[in-house]
Amino acid sequence: MANGVLFLEYPKCSTCQKAKRWLDAQGVTYTDRDIVEDNPTADELRVWHEMSGLPLKRFFNTSGMLYREMELSKKLPTLSEEEQYALLATNGMLVKRPLLVTAATAIPGFKEAAWEEALGR
């Protein structure tokens, strides 16, 4: 990771494109990773989730087509954390994006204030 910053995105996602423009405008050096071509592993997701301090559900792309097709809103409450990590690792389209990972935290979704804080801007 460049400067310890990893940016996971789906290149066709408009929010990801906006976040990437923001990172570039801030002069942030980062490693770019296509969340579909190189989807996160269950182990990576576990580490990032623990670093984030957020509920695991925040790592799911709840507005995504695949999430709805799989009826995950009904299934997630019955799955263990390990099962949820394994499920997220099956397809990058299930993962909330963009995902910013630094040495200290992981932030799913683009919230400028949270990213500024995480990057010390």
Image (cartoon, rainbow, N blue to C red):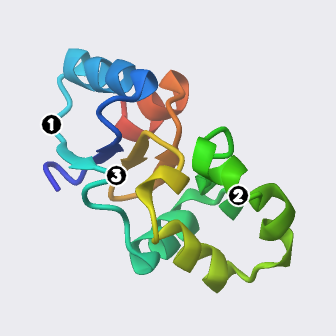
Q: Is residue 108 above or below residue 1?
A: above
Q: Is residue 68 above or below residue 84?
A: above
* Residue occupying image coordinates x 57% and y 73%: 87
Nearer to the camera, 38 or 103:
38
Quarter of image, res 30: top left
User: What's under tag 3, amino acid-wise?
Assistant: Ile
N-terminal label among 1 and 2: 1
Q: Earlier in the sequence, mark 1 or mark 3?
A: 1
Residue 27 shows in this picture: yes
Amino acid marked by disc 2:
Lys
- Residue 65 against residue 69 in the figure, above or below: above
- Asked if 105 appears above or below 81 in the picture, the reply is above
- Foreground mark, 1 or 3? 3
Q: Residue at x 37, y 65 (%)?
A: 40
Q: Position of residue 106 (x, y in %)?
A: 46, 53
From the viewer's perspective, tell me whether residue 81 is left or right of residue 20.
right
Query: Distance from label 1 to label 2 (Cα)?
Result: 28 Å
Q: Which residue is mark 1?
A: 29
Which amino acid type is shown beneath numbered disc 1? Thr
Mark 3 lies on residue? 35
**Residue lying furthest front in this view?**
69
Q: Quadrant of the N terminus?
A: bottom left
Tell me how far mark 1 sits from mark 3, CA to CA.
18 Å
